[in-house]
Image (tube, coloured by chain):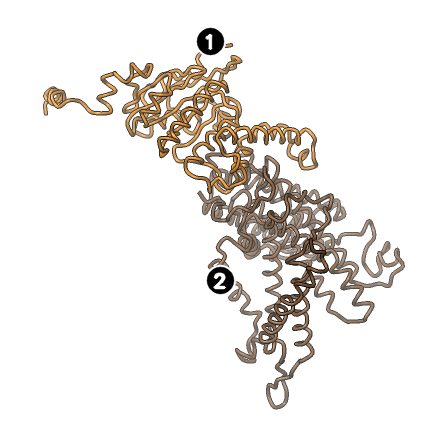
Chain colours: A brown, B orange
Amino acid sequence: MDTPETTTGRRLGPALLDATISAGIAFLLFCLLLGVRTVDSVTGITLQPRPILLAVVVGLVFFGRLALNLFWWDRDWTFPALPFLPKKQGDGASSAANEANRLGLILVAFAVLFPIVAYLLNTAFGLHLPLRYWFDLSILVLTYVMLGWGLNIVVGLAGLLDLGYVAFYAVGAYSFAIISAHFGWSFWMCLPIAGILAALWGIMLGFPVLRLRGDYLAIVTLAFGEIVRIVLQNWTDVTGGPNGISNIPGPSFFGLDFGLRAENSFHAFFGLRYDPLYGTMWLYYIILVMALITNFVTLRLRRLPMGRAWEALREDEIACRSLGINTTVTKLSAFATGALFGGFAGSFFAARQSFISPESFTFIESAIILAIVVLGGMGSQLGVAIAAAVMIGGFEALRHTDSLQLIFGQGFDPALYRMLFFGLAMVAIMIWRPRGLVSTRAPSITLRKGKAAIAGELVGEGRA
Amino acid sequence: MSTAPLLNVEHLTMRFGGLVAVDDVSFAAERGQITALIGPNGAGKTTVFNCITGFYKPSEGMIALTHASGRRFLLERLDDHAINAKAKVARTFQNIRLFPGMTALENLMVAQHERLTATAGLTLGALFGLKRFHAAERQAVELASHWLERIGLIDQADNAAGNLSYGDQRRLEIARAMCTRPELLCLDEPAAGLNARESDSLNALLRTICAEENTAILLIEHDMSVVMTISDHIIVLDHGAIIADGPPQAVREDEAVIAAYLGVPDEEVEDAEREVGL
């Protein structure tokens, strides 16, 4: 047996070669993308070279690739087993599922550390990073991750195509806003109430559509989403109509507020200098934890009879009934569970914005959430998270793609063409990966160790 | 022990608009026996099945099921899922209806939904790791493995059901139905599309189910070699009505049955035409 050091030593040559090739490709790609910048000057547009940025990026690619080669792809070590994670089954053979688990774990670790590390680096080195913007964007992405995971229960697991998911988001948001305005209850008291109210609405929607499937179900849920929005818009006495509800309190930190002049302020209690970023970071961690709870509950439910019945319902409803599964209860539980998480996300949204109006709950929101689920791969938790990051982050990235002005001229505003790009991207992904980014399905229970995932083509979509 | 027959169908009639698919059919299926329902295409066999298993509500008639314990169920009054969950009637389908994207094991676990849910403490209990549920889940996996072994698919336990070969899928569907621990197992053309060897092993499987599991079998089948070998009792349907009912030997020699399957001699046709004035 080789010791790890000697194996690493033997692999160094090919690894260096591979890293050099990657760096070369990166250089070719980025020398125009990043290496030059167009600048407005008196004489018109001039090119300003940015060699340092280019060198940094190419260097990152080189060393990153080298590190991956040496320590990751052929590693002979594994992560230590963590008590809260499912027991790892088998060794190298169970690669697909474990690899996904690991990637998920890394993403979670990154999500947990990101604000703290970014904040500390920023203050320690005085970097003047646009942290506020980064955190706000991350919170937005995480909100959509949570919504995607919630809708994934209905669409991905139970196979019930729901085009009106935003209705539950709206019910959650308005429940919290109205309760807090009338009774002065805090976010933490209203959160469960808002979730339960949204779940009840899920059941109310569920009853009339029990017999519908596929396209017909989609149409009715679409109508339901619009009904909720229009009621919110016109029921002025309660919802404030188009003016919405403002001054919604934000979530407190164990009774401490984040305002500059609040009575029990966070910074005063801990003896810190006031910084508006504390509140933003707290919001970030709340939505992160809420999203992770959604994920945990979904993964756990998949292994319980209820979740298995959802998946069986997606595969074949008639067979379900022949096996003694009450499809009414199964469908309603899927709608209610999905709506519950939508409601939680909604009341978080209200607390974060401190202002809500029917404008925020239009059909396009439902469409975006559904697109996230479909792009991610129906039923795949990791895929949905990646799709949410790509889509919401991608929207934002387009705002800053000023290099496109070089091609299309000065008057070109990329933000206006977001939907066009979005549509193109959607078409492209559906051509190349028709079942979404992560198209395989992991079995909920296995008899043997080391089970590969199930190919997406076999998995039903709940249209039959 | 109750002395009433396991399944007692009386005056069952099923109309679809003006079409009478099943017309005043009465028969019984005894405990511990294999009862076959045969007849030409369109005779109404599958309609009878769908009435028994709750997928259709019969227009008229009564379907009574009596458990060995003496408990009696009127199937025409139960919801389709309750017919399996409470009355313990399981079925398979003419065109296989497995859950193709789930593994063989998962298919058998879904079949045990009723018992697992009963221990799951409204799902919330199991969500937080209820001990009772873990024990029930282990038992469910054991029962599933037992059936996978019996149908020879234990090595395929973790493969997607949709990836199994046709014959394996047929057997898995029977195992899935058996995982609901039925008193009556209704099989809709279990031997369709099987080769001679697979068909033989299916016969052996059905005989052992009947003998060892205290489960009676009601089957629809076109393959006469299967029907004649394994059935204790045969009912022949034609145009929605029963034309013969008895042990295999008697049915085989029944003239009405032969006429229904093979047609009648030319003279008889001519006689009949003369009678109606053609």
Residue A214, how many percent across, how many down? 46, 45
Direction from residue B181 to residue A184 in the image, left or right:
right
Do the CB atoms of the residues marked 1 and 2 lie less than 8 Å apart?
no
**Is there one chain holding both mark 1 and mark 2?**
no
Compared to B35, does A19 lie above or below? below
Compared to A260, does B253 lie above or below? above
Q: Amino acid at mark 1?
A: Thr
Q: Secondary structure at mark 1?
A: loop
Residue B240, how many percent across, how many down? 30, 23
The chain letter under disc 2 is A
Q: Is residue A350 visible?
A: no
Direction from residue B271 to residue B229 in the image, left or right:
right
Q: Is residue B157 visible?
A: yes
Residue B55, quarter of the rendered image? top left
Relative depth, front residue between B264 and A217? B264
Compared to B229, does A106 lie above or below? below
Measure how far apart labels 1 and 2 are at the Cα level.
67 Å
Q: Which mark is residue B3?
A: 1
Q: Amino acid at mark 2?
A: Ala
Number of numbered markers? 2
Relative depth, front residue between B216 and A222? B216
Provide the residue designation for mark 2. A428
Q: Residue at x 48, y 20 (%)?
A: B215
Q: Residues within 10 Å of mark 2 (few under 14, many from 20)?
A: few
Relative depth, front residue between A118 and B75? A118
Q: Residue at x 60, y 51 (%)?
A: A148
Q: Secondary structure at mark 2?
A: helix
Direction from residue A371 to residue A115 in the image, left or right:
right
